[in-house]
Amino acid sequence: MALARYVAREFKSLFGLPSTISLRKVNFDAHKQGRLLIAKDFRLRKALENLDILNNNRLNFGLPESLLKRNCCKHYFSRGAFLAGGYITDSSKSAHLEITSENQQLVTEFSKMLGQQKLGSKTRLRKTFCCLYLKKRESIASFLKFIEAPKESLEFENNSVVKDIRNAANRLVNAETANANKVIKNAFRQIKEITDIENQIGLAKLPRALQEICLARLKYPEASLAILGRVMNPPLEKSAVNHRLRRIRQIADSLK
């Protein structure tokens, strides 16, 4: 409604045309839309021609090309299109900017114009209306700059950086948790194999190198292979520890 009131004021200021505003339901997103009603007036035709809505007695459903020759005009038109039918969502996983209209030709030509400005957008049909959308955060931030909304663009970019850092931290925590769970799972399996060998033939029957790794694993049940190697005397590389534990597993399997 605020945008409709602004347009009504501008119509009266520029063309001297009084208008009334009403609300109507639109099919997309179950929203209500402001509608500007202008009574029949001899000045209306001139206004529509000046706005490139009426051209040679025919309605122009596409972009008003005559009004978009300068970049500044393209900025203002894009801003108006976004205010009239656009929104942005920014979840933790993705961002989405969308501008909807019942005028498919207008949306298609608008998308081409944005493409010429290096703001690649896509369009798609949804039942009775058409939408233009941007998915990449960089593209959305660039669009906000294009419509001369630097404050909103900076805020959007800052939020994106915070979310990227948070997502990276979550991935790191998840990876470390998964790795810790794997270490513990393998350690308990190795302890069971060592216990089986002890119960059936005794650890004394094993070579000295294998006895030492068995005793170290029993003493440090939750240690990773790297830590287990560091507590050995002399210290062992991770690959050497893994090799000895594989030999323990082979012996335990042979005793089953």
Image (tube, grey):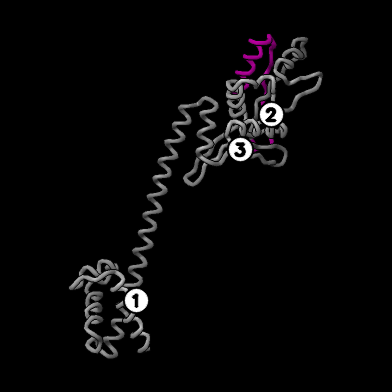
| For residue 253, above or below residue 11 | below
Q: Is residue 2 visible?
A: no
Q: Which residue is mark 1?
A: 189
Q: Which marked residue is nearer to the observer: mark 3 or mark 1?
A: 3
Secondary element at tag 2: strand
Q: Which residue is mark 2?
A: 24
Amino acid beneath label 2: Arg
What is the crowding at mark 1: few (fewer than 14 residues within 10 Å), some, or many (at least 20)?
A: few
In the drawing, does residue 33 fall left or right of residue 194? Answer: right
Residue at mark 2 to residue at mark 1: CA–CA distance: 68 Å
Q: Which residue is mark 3?
A: 121
Q: Earlier in the sequence, mark 3 or mark 1?
A: 3
Residue 39: image quadrant is top right
Q: Earlier in the sequence, mark 3 or mark 2?
A: 2
Find residue 82 and report its horizontal and vertical position in percent: 59, 29
Q: Earlier in the sequence, mark 2 or mark 1?
A: 2
- Magenta segment range? 1-30
Secondary element at tag 1: helix
Is 7 magenta? The answer is yes
Q: Is residue 10 visible?
A: yes
**Residue at 59%, 32% in the rendered image:** 86
Amino acid beneath label 1: Arg
Secondary element at tag 3: loop
| For residue 242, above or below residue 71 | below
Residue most toward the right?
A: 57
What is the crowding at mark 2: few (fewer than 14 residues within 10 Å), some, or many (at least 20)?
A: few
Of the 4 image quadrants, the one containing the N terminus is top right
What is the crowding at mark 3: few (fewer than 14 residues within 10 Å), some, or many (at least 20)?
A: many
Find residue 109 and report its horizontal and vertical position in percent: 69, 31
In the drawing, does residue 237 fall left or right of residue 146? Answer: left
Residue at mark 3 to residue at mark 2: CA–CA distance: 28 Å
Amino acid beneath label 3: Ser
